[in-house]
Image (cartoon, rainbow, N blue to C red):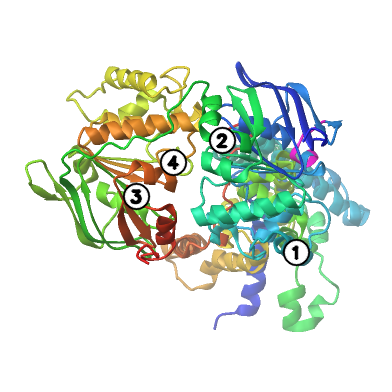
Amino acid sequence: MDNKIAAVTMRNITKRFGPTLANDKVWLNIYRGEILALLGENGSGKTTLMNMLSGIYFPDEGEIAIDGKPVVIRSPKDAFALGIGMIHQHFKLVDVLTAAENIVLGLEGKLDLKTAAKKIREICDTYGFEVDPDQKIYDMSVSQKQTVEIVKVLYRGADILILDEPTAVLTPQETDKLFAVLRNMRDAGKAIVIITHKMHEVESLSDRVAVLRHGQFIGDMPTKSTNAQEMTNMMVGHPVVLNIDRPEPDDPKPRVEVRDLTVRDVEGTLKLDHVSFTAMSGEILGIAGISGSGQKELLEAIAGLQPVESGSIEYIADNGQREQLIGKDPLAIQEMGVALSFVPEDRLGMGLVGNMDLGYNMMLRSYRSGKSVFTNRKAPYKLARQMVDFLEIATPSVETPVRRLSGGNVQKVLVGREIANAPSVLLTAYAVRGLDINSSYLIYDTINAQKMRGVAVVYVGEDLDVLLELCDRILVLCGGKVSGIVPGRGAKKRDVGMMMTKLGGNAHE
Amino acid sequence: MFDFVSFIPRAVVQGIPLLLGSTGETITEKSGNLNLGIPGIMYVGGICGVIGSFYYEAGKSAQEMNTALTILIPLSCCLLGSFLMGLLYCFLTVTLRANQNVTGLALTTFGVGFGNFFGGSLIKLSGSSLPSIIMTNTSNVFRRTLPFADKTGVFGKLFLNYGFLAYAAVAIALAASYVLNHTRTGLHLRAVGESPTTADAAGINVTRYKYVATCLGAMIAGLGGLYYVMDYACGVWTNDAFGDRGWLAIALVIFTIWRPNVGVLASFLFGGLYILHMYIPSGMNLAVKELYKMAPYVVTIIVLVITSMRNKRENQPPASLGLPYFREER
């Protein structure tokens, strides 16, 4: 490895955002024919570092060399010219344009979509992609959009590819497909950097690992000579226990009984089709499924936010008294102790107001309480301060607008607020979406603590490995139908994956 | 019997200012700028043209006037005036990131006031007994049609009976449509209006596209004001006579679902609806006439309802319309 010339050498890179040091004298080498996994917690400066390669930011200090020659990258255009292409975490695509139009966006010369489409097909054939150049982006699934992003950088002749958390939104099958393509590209001699939080992906895909912590370069090593535990310790800076705790449920009793729930959206598309299950107290029920299989509708139906076509949702109190939730006001359902925390893809879309500070966001849940015409501002701020301490939320103060916090911290605020309500049913979706390992474990611990309190937890997740480790039972949704309910202990990832894509899967073969 | 041969040409001349206004506004909106200053800009375009031709025509007889200059002077005054209005809008909304709605409405108020102030001043200067300025000679040049237009019967009346600006308006609309849909510049402009972050990451200069599109759009809209005074109104400027045509132009943008080529026929339809009340016998009942005058707005609302219900992505306004772009905002 030492005799190879690095495709990219970053020396002594420093980047400040105001008073915060995002990157502090970072050194990094990227080689051709190699997949480098860049690891680090949220806010450790991985994306910032890569944004300096792709021309979005400009480093305050330090130098970058491509193939040994010093270069200056001032704009995305400069980066393209040097063969650097970045696939951002949030796709940079225009929805109403076709794949081909998006791919040629920003290039010079006469607009010739036919030639472009031909070139796109060639690229697809070379690496094994499937892209229809004439398809509109809004008609595409997340994984198709990602493919368009990758083809876009290849179209520009990139041979240094940076992927920022590419698997966060993919199913296991789609992830496997992406990894196969990435290996193809590595074998074709391209340099690939992948930013991810998922340890098993690092282990199965990468050749070399580089770790950042608090903006500083901690070290790099060949993947073969390390393991998940060592990498995590390097990232966090102190030893971390990697096993997710799964205590045995304590005296589970039916809490919410859903029978034949059928839901249609505004356009009349069937979103949930005769879904039946029971959520037990003191138990975590995981919901697995490809995104858009009806998870959102299911949780919203229970919380009273979604009109239901038919079926019943019954809340069973401790004394065995049953109460129908359908037709009830969301506020009344909330007062019965059903809490919903849904973390949407953009994180701020649901439940939090970006321009309000932490205290006011706490108040969104409590402003109705009390008799006075004035709101009680002391209690929510006290709650906010407790949460900042307990969940280790990195914020300058509780008076900081939520919008300014990093993604992971925003999520802690949202999940923390719902838990603080002391619910009897906790509905949570994508609670750890995009969170680093340490924060994720904090959230798992919090959820487990609720379970031990006797709360019925419904956990919608996208990372199958976590679902398999955390949940007592897993309900698999496939196109709005229940594909099966499996016990969390002993379930196989492959089987659950199959059930996600096909009703019933081959689990019983 | 409804007299189509006289109705259609009148609908067309009513429609041309709307067509120019809406083409300009469509180009502007494609860059993500919702310029509600269009009524004011059209007004400024008109009065600037009037100022130019007023000073050129003053004291000259028709024979003394150079045809080219008679056209070029008001034309360039009009373009300059509306360009400056577009530039002001851009500076406020793009560079200073002011709220687009407020800025646009302020420009409209300003433009109308500007027009009425200079209109009033010129009326004073001309010493006319009527509250208007009359530039017959200039207007005659603007209204000149092909020499054989009168001899071609109904065909000539329907298609050849207009001044050059009318044909220019149609040409501009068709050209704008072509550029938007078939060239790289158009693709980039659409990307800027849909998702400036994406455009920026693709190496497109968002600020430049917004400035150029908005200023160009303002100049085209300004021509609508010039056409109104010089051609439609036969060279007679009266304060406030321009009416609500600017707002109608903005309504037309929605009606055409952001397509300038559709705007060609749609503007004639709007023009027709605008004057329908003169062709439908309503007797002495003025209230009924007022009802007919509402027709263009009612049609726009119906189109809005239908396009919203069909919810087709292509028929929606540019996704980032009305939003300021700031690279470091997250």
Given this view, does label 1 or label 4 mark the residue nearer the observer? Answer: 1
Given this view, does label 3 or label 4 mark the residue nearer the observer? Answer: 3
**What residue is shown at x 45% (from left), y 26% (from top)?**
A240
Mark pair 1, 3: CA separation: 44 Å
Q: Chain of mark 2?
A: B
Q: Of marks 1 and 4, which one's residue comes earlier in the chain?
A: 1
Which sits in the foreground, A39 or A142?
A: A39
Q: Secondary structure at mark 4?
A: loop
Residue designated by label 3: A490
Magenta-drawn segment: A72-78
Which sits in the foreground, A215 or A115?
A: A215
Q: Amino acid at mark 2?
A: Asn
Residue designated by label 2: B99
Q: Of marks 1 and 3, which one's residue comes earlier in the chain?
A: 1
Labelled pair 1, 2 in contact (Cβ < 8 Å): no
- Can see residue A197? yes
- Mark linked to residue A349: 4
**What residue is shown at x 44% (from left), y 30% (from top)?**
A439
- Can see residue A462? no
Q: Quadrant of residue B271?
A: bottom right
Given this view, does label 4 or label 2 mark the residue nearer the observer? Answer: 4
Judge from the rendering whether residue B235 lies leftward or rightward of residue B299; answer left or right.
Answer: right
Which sits in the foreground, A306 or A28?
A: A28
Residue designated by label 1: A122
Q: How many neighbours does mark 1 have within 10 angstroms: few (below 14), some (14-19), or many (20 or more)?
A: some
- Mark linked to residue B250: none
Task: For the N terminus of chain A, give its image quadrant.
Answer: top right
Given this view, does label 1 or label 2 mark the residue nearer the observer? Answer: 1
Given this view, does label 3 or label 2 mark the residue nearer the observer? Answer: 3
Labelled pair 1, 3 in contact (Cβ < 8 Å): no
